[in-house]
Amino acid sequence: MTARRMRIGIDTGGTFTDVVAFDEDSGAVVTTKTPSTPGNPADGFLAGIDKVLDLAGASFDDVVAVSHGTTVATNQLLEGKVDALGFITTEGYEAMLEIARQSVPDGYGNSYFWVKPDRIVPRDLVKGVGGRLDHTGAEIRPFDEDGARTVARWFKQQGIDTLGVCFLHAYANPAHEERMREILLEEHPEAVVSISSEVLREYREYERSMTTLVDAAVKPKLSRYVNNIKDRLASQSGRTIPFYVMKSNGGVLSADEVVHQPITTVLSGPAAGALGAALIAKVAGFDKVLTSDGGGTSTDVSVVIDGEPTLTTEGSVGVYPSKIPMIDVVTVGAGGGSIAWLSPEGTLKVGPHSAGADPGPICYRKGGTEVTITDAHVFLGRIPPHLLGGEIPLDVDAASAAIRELAAKLEITPEACATGILEISAWNQANALRQVTVKRGLDVRDFTLTTFGGSGSLLLCRLMDVLGVPTVLVPPNPGNVSAFGLLTVDVKNDYVQTHVALHEDLDPTSLQAEYDVLAERAAAALAKEGFAPEQHVFVRTADVRYFGQAFEVRVGVPDGPITAESLQTVADRFHAEHHTLYGYDFAQDPTQQVEVVNLRVSGVGPIKRPEIPKASSDQSAPQQTGSRQVCFDAEDGYVDTPVYWRTDLPAGQVLTGPVIIEEFGSTVPIHPGFTARVDDYANIVVTRSDA
């Protein structure tokens, strides 16, 4: 029997582990879900592989690669579970973390009301070492090796085994940091060490220090997790299966390498969803897309233009800024488990706290006592009285009783209470979508909204009304889009070098040399990942600003040799992008000088992507699977609403609301006044009936 070539994508969530298998030879795609195992995620991970291989009629012998989206680093940072951490910096700069940026977060107005949060490393665990470089990397004072050994021994005596090292201007010359790491390995061999010149080779000491410390903080836990899964895969298959982990920048990296770059995984899960939705929408013919990934706890939103999600380096996870390339994702606490509650003033609030998966919503029958968004949906009839095709029955009566009790406190009808809960959730999601569009100079009405995840499509009609979005696309198997996205992702590594110079002073030869060095580092990494030189793809960008500004705009650098003409193209692109973001530019003002700050190269190793299959065009009319009473508007009450099973709907099928479309992992309620059409790729495309 001929061996098959199966690639598997696995996205581990709080409740379910989503699995997609792709047969590279036949193009067949198989999807499934299995319960997550928070106690040991590797158990659910392996169970998911077993289940999808069984469904595909394949075995471990057929698996050629496994790609994984993980929330290990994300959750550790969101929960603030950072173990004892030490920080080593340049002597005299030990208060760097305390000073930070001297800025008060938005929303406080007056710093009198703001309480400075605990720093990632307390002041007593920060140590300075002598030695000094200038901004060009030239040595002003030699590195103090005796002082470095004293510091290393002190941390060993204190039992601090996780350390971050950030010396001034190490981005220009890593020699002092590399020597510090050598001394740490000699004096404190058990230590896990991150150095800034490897984590983030660009200027701004505070951001570089924080990013390095976040990298160090998540390294032990992520390494244990990744190595555990890698070992379990090897023992179960009897061989080494290539194992890749999703990175925040929209690429994947082998498990062996990602344990040395753990910070690159801090948005691993949301990034995969954005990429999967990007490919599905592009094939369907939509080039400007908003993605909305609704789960049990939160909803993640992002922008995709021409198939490419927007990247940022100004992100943070929880309270920790992380200045690494990451897909620009905004997260809002509006998921199926988000809790409805009364404020002290007696007004209705929803989220951000969540009932999670355990105990979960009241209707889950696991002991939940607080009304959630899912309870409101089931009370209004918008989701069926069971999930996953009947695998998980829901207690409609318990949810109804809790909604009525909450409505009595508000002195409104139960229907008004439930629709009010969903209205607040819809506005929370809409505000997140505005953050990634309006705040970045984009008009939300120019985009198609792609909704996915288990709860992502339940409020799409209200989002269309609130935002003025003309079209919504719902992919097939929306709960598995993140896992599918893992199979569409290239291997990708990013490299950066600070190079501050005015545009008029830039030397093309010097810039070419620096880009070549970055490209060589990227090529070495791709070779280590098994890509032949002819497969390597390099993408060059630069961070640019007007002289005197504190923040930069990233723009693409043309392919080919660096010349005066290509540098002028960079300046022109910067003016245009600045105008898009801020509403103005100085392209016609020669007194406003353009300044380049950072040079960047992304090394990409392309993989074979799954083909999006076309839907059946069976011309026979699909049969209703039933009907039920559904409330779309509190004033109109319940209306008898037809229910269809999604996989029965052929390409070209048109359904006019009110109608409910159900499938194994999700439900799509189509409100009165809206129309759903099945396109050639089995997507549901929702528009207004009068459009």
Image (tube, grey):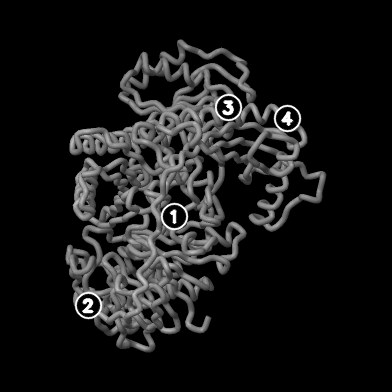
- Sequence-wise, the earlier of marks 4 and 3 is 4
- Sequence-wise, the earlier of marks 1 and 3 is 1
Q: Are marks 1 and 2 in contact (CB under 8 Å)?
A: no
Q: Gap between marks 1 and 3, in whole Å?
A: 31 Å
Q: Kindly report which numbered mark, 2 or 4, lies closer to the viewer in this rendering.
A: 4
Q: Residues within 10 Å of mark 2 (few under 14, many from 20)?
A: some
**Residue 408 visible from this viewpoint:** no
Nearer to us in this view, 529 or 429? 529
Q: Residue 371 appears at what percent x and percent y?
A: 28, 69
Q: State whether residue 665 is above or below residue 626.
A: above
Q: Quadrant of residue 653?
A: bottom left
Q: Are marks 1 and 4 in contact (CB under 8 Å)?
A: no
- Residue 507, disc: 4
Query: Residue placed at 47% from the left, 64% from the top?
Result: 284
Q: Gap between marks 2 and 4, in whole Å?
A: 72 Å
Q: Gap between marks 3 and 2, in whole Å?
A: 66 Å
